Image (spheres, rainbow, N blue to C red):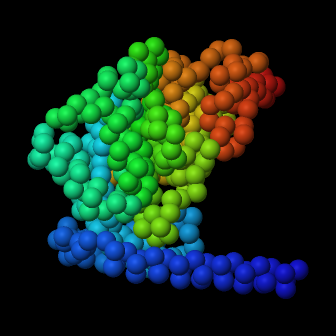
Amino acid sequence: MGRLKKGNGQHIEKHYRSLMERCQVRLDDMDRALPAAVEDFSTVLEERGVSRRSFLKWSSVMTAALMLPPMFEPMVAKAAEQFNRLPVVWLHFAECTGCSEALLRTSYPNIDDILLDTISLEYHETLMVAAGHQAEANLEKALADFPGKFICVIEGAVPKAMDGKFLTLGPHGKTGLELAKHVTSKAAATICIGSCSSFGNIPAAAPNPTDCVGIGKALGISTVNITGCPPNPTNFVGTVLHYLLFGGLPALDALGRPIWAYGKRIHDCCERRPHYDAAEFVEEWDDAGAKKGWCLYKMGCKGPYTFGNCGHVRFNDGMSWPVMAGHGCIGCTEPAFWDTMKPLEQPISKDTIGGGEKTVDTIGTALAGIAVAGIAVHAVGTALVHKNKDDK
């Protein structure tokens, strides 16, 4: 048995060594293929007050987040230094620009934020100074200069009704549908940032008169979906780093989301989970349970139905996240959450207990294959167990 384990370990190490060699070749090829960086990344870090030690520590954390062994830490660090050389074309469709805001706004920049500040944005309608014909010329120049080498990032759903005419852009009145087809056809990969571009979500909420849908569905293409409303910047940065390292996109779940970021339910990694297991629930806002940090399931928390790493990476410089701050998860990383997770401050359905709705059974099951109806039953069952113990 010991010999078998040793043999397996050697095989795994050999596999990773081979993978590292491929990464090195990939990064060397990018050195030659990508445009020179406008700024030296080491200098940028120094100017922002980030030490080399802090950068290497971040590389270690990101390596683990990407589910890679520690031997890849130098590779992740090198890929991060290439981050500002990768051309990015960023399109906006039916959305609120909240995803861009979340990625750009920070009070104390960490390394993720610095990477986003230095990203090579060839086109971004919200940030660029150019407008009209000049903006369109900039877009066409980027497509001509970097065919098959740039990443297309799309924020917002695409209206399909009236041949897409509910959304027209630019001096020539191109529809969002036309523009999306044109740009994605020339991109190395397409990343949907936020749940609107991934699944349609709020713009596609019932009754959806504009027939908004996600990019993948609208164009019939495969996309990487960085879901959330808004998503955490770390999930976008990690996905781009994976592309830089391997020349391909990370392993995805059935909904096109990177498994490294969306492989677990919010419920499984929540700091309030022990209270759920102990049947300690907040019954009303500002009751004694709320003040003690008890479980928010009865107040509508959709954590049991939702996949994401919010509790790990958190928001606002890693300070907090909605459940920690006192409000339940609204399920914003899931398809059609605005329709399927409502009402947001109540459990999905009272009928879930003792039978469950068929629509509920499909929520959050892409990876684990869980019967969601059983979650509510488990919650009630746990409460009954504790009640019986108390009665005795």
Tell which of 50 and 102 is nearer to you.
Answer: 102
The quarter in which the C terminus is drawn is: top right
Q: Residue 22, how many percent across, how many down?
A: 53, 78
Q: Is residue 108 visible?
A: no
Q: Residue 45, how many percent across, how many down?
A: 24, 71
> In the rendered image of this protein, does residue 48 appear above or below residue 43?
above
> In the rendered image of this protein, does residue 94 appear above or below residue 106?
above
Q: Residue 240, how many percent across, how many down?
A: 41, 60
The quadrant where residue 15 appears: bottom right
Q: Residue 31, how many percent across, how many down?
A: 34, 78
Tell which of 365 and 390 is nearer to you.
Answer: 365
The quarter in which the N terminus is drawn is: bottom right
Residue occupying the point 18% across, 70% down: 38
Q: Is residue 115 left or right of residue 251?
A: left
Label count reads 0
Q: Is residue 267 visible?
A: yes
Residue occupying the point 30% across, 52% down: 89
Tell which of 215 and 332 is nearer to you.
Answer: 215
> In the rendered image of this protein, does residue 48 appear above or below residue 193?
below
Residue occupying the point 55% across, 23% down: 340
> In the rendered image of this protein, does residue 44 appear above or below residue 230?
below
Residue occupying the point 66% across, 37% down: 365
The quadrant where residue 125 appears: top left
